[in-house]
């Protein structure tokens, strides 16, 4: 049974009537003084798991967050709820820091955010000794994994929390971790005795789709124009140059987009991130350096134009879509060059053989997800050790099942070409030359090396060039072919001989024919995504848009808030993101219910006491208008 104070905080501060999933048990564990290790997907409600115990237990909850640039936004969101929150980081001047320290020592803060590197400073540790700490929350705990996708060296020092403050409960939280990573987190953070909580990794509102890469810029533009007009979203690219090019391309085609990568100066990055959080309908084109800790609930799509290095990274990045539970899209364009590039990066990466083998295993799992003819969601969940139905009804392979075909003969032709080039000519080439040989093309390079004299010349005319590229890609994915060297030339593997000797069958996913632009498949009736957010009727939709206009007018103008713990300025004056006032999901409920009084408005999820007092009458006025 959850304590009455926890329920009171949930209802009156955060505006919700019930806990989700394992939130209640996690919160009770911390309130009781015990440690917890929590795996919960993005948008699953991780923050409440430490915010509520921090408000219930005596003292201040100390949150270790790696995201200095976002601490102000996190604190502003809590202050809008009436929670007394502050932060300590390098962006503050001396007076701001001293004020926060005084409030902490005086017991006037409910939550205090610090960076892991800041917590390692002796003066910060002495400060925490002078006040009362209710709990330690270690957010983004996967950053402790040394071979993970977001490793932060300062996280390795956080085991000292238990050594220095042994009686203070700790909670480590992450949105993605395999069982091996979970054990590494527990070991490195000295959480051997912690209770483990693993929520479902399923995000049923996200539609996973992986498309064959043909003209990726045009494919992306089609996606945004046909399905996500005016929506906020994130586009991930591998390189800084690609980020700049794609952002410019989108802007030239009438889509508001901003770049984000480490090559931009800090001020530009901070400004672009701030605009993305505060404005509706912006597209952020970024390297994977962007996104961790972003609490924007209405990101409607995440698109990848380059292959992620691991399933963990892919899941973490796609999970930034649809935090509000509304239907959202995770879209990836994937092609042969992605596989070649990733294999080359692994071959030339720093680290020993064990490290490269670990990187290769991560990539293999990602390639298996891309090439599967089964339900993508079930394969994704299986990677994290979670059972799932054979069909989810809301991924591309379920909605438009792909064809598989026996590609053994095609594989033999391709592998024979690579073999003959090496044995008969002592040569190694990339995929393009082998495909030209199979297609019988009379190019300058074919003539130069007299490759038309090879016995395999022209034996592959039964497949299109795009199909041959798919054959190469799938052989690379299955480990039946490899790339090596600076130029990514094709070489055989130990497993290739089993195919050449006809001892192994090679099943492949059929490459789609080039097609005119089409709209994406819709979730079938009864699927989890279709049930995630029922459409509003036309009248309610008009009300919802009116409420969004009110919220935008109140949330997107003005500068940053003057530093103060108890400011009551609305968002327009305070400069907080519009969603900090109310999420879209809350506005939809209001539009559907159309409350006529503050008492009726208080029954809507997400309307706590402080927001009711600040914005309640404005909402009623907007409804009446």
Image (spheres, helix red, strand yellow):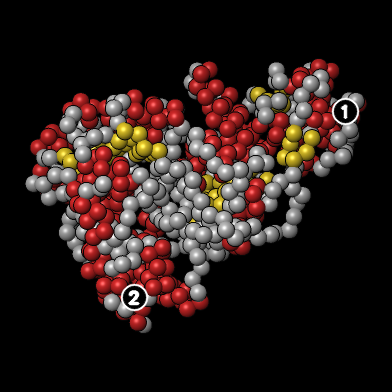
What x and y, as percent, mark residue 552?
38, 68
Reading the image, the residue beneath label 1 is: 456
Q: Is residue 576 left or right of residue 177?
A: left
What x and y, as percent, mark residue 171?
29, 37
Answer above or below: position of 299 versus 139.
below
Quarter holding the C terminus is bottom left
Instruction: Give me the residue at 39% from left, 73% from top.
Output: 593
What x and y, as percent, mark residue 169?
22, 35
Report which quarter residue 619 is drawn in: bottom left
Reading the image, the residue beneath label 2 is: 595
Binning the other alpha carbons within 10 Å of mark 2 as few (below 14), some (14 to 19) or many (20 upward) gives some
Q: Is residue 148 visible?
A: yes
Q: Secondary structure at mark 1?
A: loop
Instruction: Give me the residue at 54% from left, 42% from top.
Output: 388
- Foreground mark, 1 or 2, reads 2
Which residue occupies the foreground of this view, 193 or 560?
193
Q: Earlier in the sequence, mark 1 or mark 2?
A: 1
């Amino acid at each position: 049974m959850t304590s009455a104070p926890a329920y009171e905080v949930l209802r009156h501060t955060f505006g919700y009537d019930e806990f989700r999933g394992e939130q209640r048990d996690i919160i009770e564990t911390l309130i009781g003084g015990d440690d917890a290790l929590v795996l919960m997907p993005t948008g699953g409600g991780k923050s409440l798991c430490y915010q509520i115990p921090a408000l219930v237990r005596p003292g201040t909850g100390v949150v270790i967050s790696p995201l200095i640039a976002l601490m102000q936004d996190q604190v502003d969101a809590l202050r809008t709820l009436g929670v007394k929150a502050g932060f300590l980081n390098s962006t503050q001047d001396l007076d701001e820091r001293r004020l926060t320290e005084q409030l902490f020592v005086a017991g006037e803060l409910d939550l205090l955010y610090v960076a892991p590197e800041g917590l390692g400073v002796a003066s910060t540790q002495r400060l925490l000794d002078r006040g009362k700490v209710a709990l330690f929350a270690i957010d983004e705990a996967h950053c402790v994994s040394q071979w993970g996708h977001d490793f932060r060296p300062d996280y390795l020092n956080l085991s000292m929390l238990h050594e220095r403050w042994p009686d203070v409960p700790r909670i480590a939280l992450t949105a993605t971790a395999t069982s091996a990573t979970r054990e590494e987190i527990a070991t490195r953070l000295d959480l051997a005795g912690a209770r483990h909580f693993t929520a479902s990794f399923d995000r049923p509102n996200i539609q996973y789709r992986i498309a064959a890469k043909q003209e990726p810029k045009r494919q992306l533009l089609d996606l945004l124009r046909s399905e996500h007009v005016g929506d906020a979203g994130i586009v991930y690219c591998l390189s800084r140059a690609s980020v700049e090019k794609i952002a410019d391309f989108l802007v030239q085609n009438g889509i508001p987009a901003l770049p984000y990568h480490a090559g931009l100066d800090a001020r530009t990055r901070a400004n672009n991130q701030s605009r993305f959080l505060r404005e509706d309908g912006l597209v952020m084109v970024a390297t994977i350096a962007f996104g961790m800790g972003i609490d924007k609930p209405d990101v409607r799509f995440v698109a990848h134009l380059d292959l992620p290095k691991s399933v963990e990274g892919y899941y973490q990045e796609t999970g930034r879509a649809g935090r509000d539970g509304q239907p959202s899209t995770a879209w990836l364009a994937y092609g042969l060059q992605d596989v070649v590039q990733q294999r080359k990066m692994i071959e030339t990466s720093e680290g020993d053989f064990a490290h490269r083998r670990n990187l290769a295993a991560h990539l293999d799992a990602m390639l298996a997800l891309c090439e599967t003819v089964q339900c993508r969601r079930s394969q994704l969940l299986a990677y994290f050790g979670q059972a799932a139905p054979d069909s989810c009804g809301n991924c591309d392979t379920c909605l438009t099942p792909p064809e598989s075909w026996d590609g053994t003969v095609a594989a033999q032709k391709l592998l024979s070409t690579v073999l003959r080039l090496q044995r008969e000519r002592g040569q190694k080439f990339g995929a393009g030359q082998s495909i030209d040989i199979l297609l019988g093309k009379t190019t300058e390079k074919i003539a130069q090396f007299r490759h038309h004299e090879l016995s395999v010349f022209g034996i592959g005319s039964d497949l299109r060039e795009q199909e041959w590229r798919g054959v190469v890609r799938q052989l690379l994915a299955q480990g039946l072919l490899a790339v090596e060297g600076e130029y990514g030339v094709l070489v055989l593997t130990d497993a290739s001989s089993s195919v050449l000797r006809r001892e192994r069958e090679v099943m492949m996913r059929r490459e789609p024919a080039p097609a005119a632009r089409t709209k994406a498949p819709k979730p079938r009736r009864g699927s989890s995504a279709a049930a995630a957010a029922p459409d509003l009727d036309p009248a309610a939709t008009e009300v919802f848009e009116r409420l969004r206009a009110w919220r935008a007018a109140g949330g997107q103008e003005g500068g940053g808030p003057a530093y103060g713990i108890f400011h009551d300025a609305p968002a327009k004056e305070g400069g907080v993101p519009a969603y900090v006032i109310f999420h879209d999901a809350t506005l939809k409920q209001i539009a559907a219910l159309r409350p006529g009084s503050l008492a009726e408005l208080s029954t809507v999820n997400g309307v706590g006491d402080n927001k009711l007092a600040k914005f309640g009458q404005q909402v009623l006025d907007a409804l009446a208008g």
